[in-house]
Image: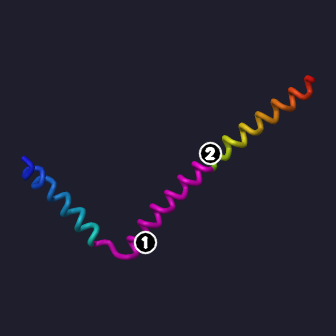
Amino acid sequence: MVTEKIISNAPYVASAGTVIAGLTLKDWGVIIGIILTTITVVVNWVYKHRRDKRETELFNRQITNLSQSANK
């Protein structure tokens, strides 16, 4: 049973190995560049979203404080 899984997956592993072995240094540079750029965009989006959330909360607090001061 285990050998059947190994035998059935062997062509996929061999194909992946062939593709990886056929890539040049320039190809790897492009792939790594795309991956790092994607990670950078996601991290920047997360931090920008957190910053916007903090600024919105601060703004709402300031508005609440101003309206409470005006009512006194």
Which secondary structure, mark 2?
Answer: helix
Estimate the x, y position of residue 27 in percent, counting from the top left: 38, 71
Percent of width and height locating residue 66: 87, 32
Q: Residue flagged by tag 1: what amino acid is it?
A: Gly
- In this rendering, position of residue 35 left or right of residue 71: left
Q: Amino acid at mark 2?
A: His
Residue 54: image quadrant is top right
Q: Is residue 62 magenta?
A: no
Residues shaded magenta: 22-47
Q: Relative to the observer, which residue lies in front, 48 or 66?
A: 66
Secondary structure under the numbered disc 1 in the rendered image: helix
Q: Residue at 55%, 53% (x, y): give it.
A: 43
- Residue 8: mark: none
Q: Residue furthest top?
A: 71
The residue that label 2 is drawn on is 49
The residue under the point 72% across, 43% down is 55
Q: Disc number at residue 29?
A: 1
Crowdedness near tag 2: few (<14), some (14–19) or many (≥20) residues, C-alpha within 10 Å:
few
Answer with left or right where residue 5 lies relative to residue 48: left
Main secondary structure of the magenta stretch = helix
Which quarter of the figure is the C terminus placed in? top right
- Mark in the foreground, 2 or 1: 2
Identify which residue is drawn at 51% across, 61% down. 37
Q: In the picture, residue 31 is in which quadrant?
A: bottom left
How many numbered dots are placed on residues in this image?
A: 2
Q: Residue at x 49, y 57 (%)?
A: 38
Is label 2 in contact with label 1 (beta carbons under 8 Å)?
A: no
Mark 1: few, some, or many residues within 10 Å (few <14, many ≥20)?
few
- Along the polypeptide, which appears first: circle 2 or circle 1? 1
**63 left or right, relative to 15:** right
Q: Relative to 14, does residue 1 appear above or below in the rendering?
A: above
